[in-house]
Image (spheres, helix red, strand yellow):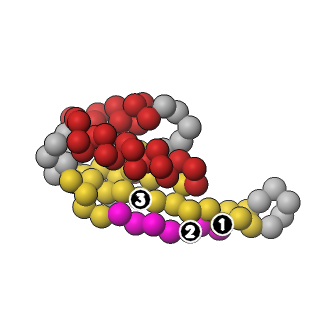
Amino acid sequence: MAEENTVYIGKKPTMNYVLAVVSQVNAGHDDVCIKARGRAISRAVDVAEIVKNRFVQELGYKDVKIATEKLPSLDGGSANVSSIEIYLSK
């Protein structure tokens, strides 16, 4: 999936990301990917559900991938961080 179809979830309010996903769909993209790591995972699930149930009813789940990523920590070690990718498709 192209980078332009991907919405990365961070610390902004949920509706900002909902607007980004809806804008991708309105721009003519049939597939959109929502990516998040760590504490933002719950916000990513909220975004997917809000878009699917309130704004674009014909959108459905194509795939959901979960993983653990090793990130370098400040003390020189590494930390495991959970990640999720939610693929929505018409």
Residue 20 visible in the current orientation: no
Q: Is residue 70 visible?
A: yes
Q: Position of residue 11 (x, y in %)?
A: 56, 37
Residue 68 circle label = 2
Left or right for 5, reference 80? left
Image spot of residue 8 (x, y percent): 46, 46
User: Alpha-carbon distance for marks 1 and 2?
Assistant: 6 Å
* Vertical side of 22 occupied by 61: above or below: below
Looking at the picture, how far across and down is residue 83, in whole percent? 52, 60
Is the residue marked by circle 3 packed among few (<14), some (14-19), or many (20+) residues within 10 Å? many
60 drawn magenta:
no
Q: Is residue 70 left or right of residue 40?
A: right
Q: Which residue is mark 1?
A: 80
Q: Which residues are magenta?
A: 64-70
Does residue 67 belong to the magenta stretch? Answer: yes
Q: Quadrant of the N terminus?
A: bottom left
**Which amino acid type is shown beneath numbered disc 3?**
Glu
Residue 52 shown left or right of residue 20 in the figure: left
